[in-house]
Amino acid sequence: VQLQASGGGSVQAGGSLRVSCAVSGRTVRRITMGWFRQVPGKDKEFVAAFHSSNSSPYYADSVKGRFIISRDAAKNMVALHMNSLQPEDTAVYYCAAGSAILSSLRQNTAYNYWGQGTQVTVSS
């Protein structure tokens, strides 16, 4: 499985950005897909995910109501639409894939494959 992330960039607080992840080697509906973010000196933090067992999105409390994870089976891609961005959302964002069980969805160690990170910077 290979993941190619794109998007991100810089925006002022309150703005929106999108990050996308093109997936090869596995159908996005048949593998758990997640987004994590990382700031220097800290571990990767769960942001959002789709589990392979269902079509319901899962979100971290910190982004619920602001971020939307989407999945496009035709393009075999997942995306993260980020709205009402705040400076604390500044991080490198990573897409991930794997066979994580539902109870481990929010743990970065449960994912087998990672895309390259893409920077998101939100200025106040």
Image (cartoon, rainbow, N blue to C red):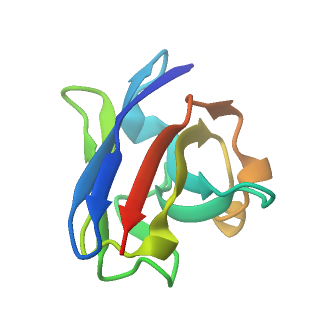
**Which quarter of the figure is the N terminus placed in?**
top right
33 displayed left or right of 22: right
Give the image quarter of residue 4. top left
> Could you say which quadrant of the image residue 101 lies in?
bottom right
Compared across the picture, whether 62 is left or right of 43 comes to left
| Residue under the image location 50 percent in, 55 percent down | 51
Q: In front: 119, or 105?
A: 119
Q: Position of residue 95 (x, y in %)?
A: 51, 41
- Taking the spot 36% from the left edge, 75% from the top edge, the residue there is 124
**Residue 14: % across, % down:** 23, 76
Q: Is residue 80 visible to us here?
A: no
Residue found at the very far front of the displayed protein: 124
Q: Position of residue 21 (x, y in %)?
A: 38, 33
Residue situated in front as seen by the camera: 108 or 102: 108
Going 52% across and 50% down the picture, which residue do you hit? 34
Side of 75 relative to 104 (left or right) = left
Is residue 123 visible in the rendered image? The answer is yes
Depth check: give the residue in front, 28 or 38: 38
Q: Check the image and report above or below for 45 versus 34.
A: below
Question: Residue 59's x, y, as percent?
Answer: 46, 72
Q: Is residue 38 above or below residue 19?
A: below
- The total of numbered circles placed on residues is 0
Residue at 79 percent of width and 50 percent of height = 109
Q: Nearer the viewer, residue 37 or 49?
A: 37
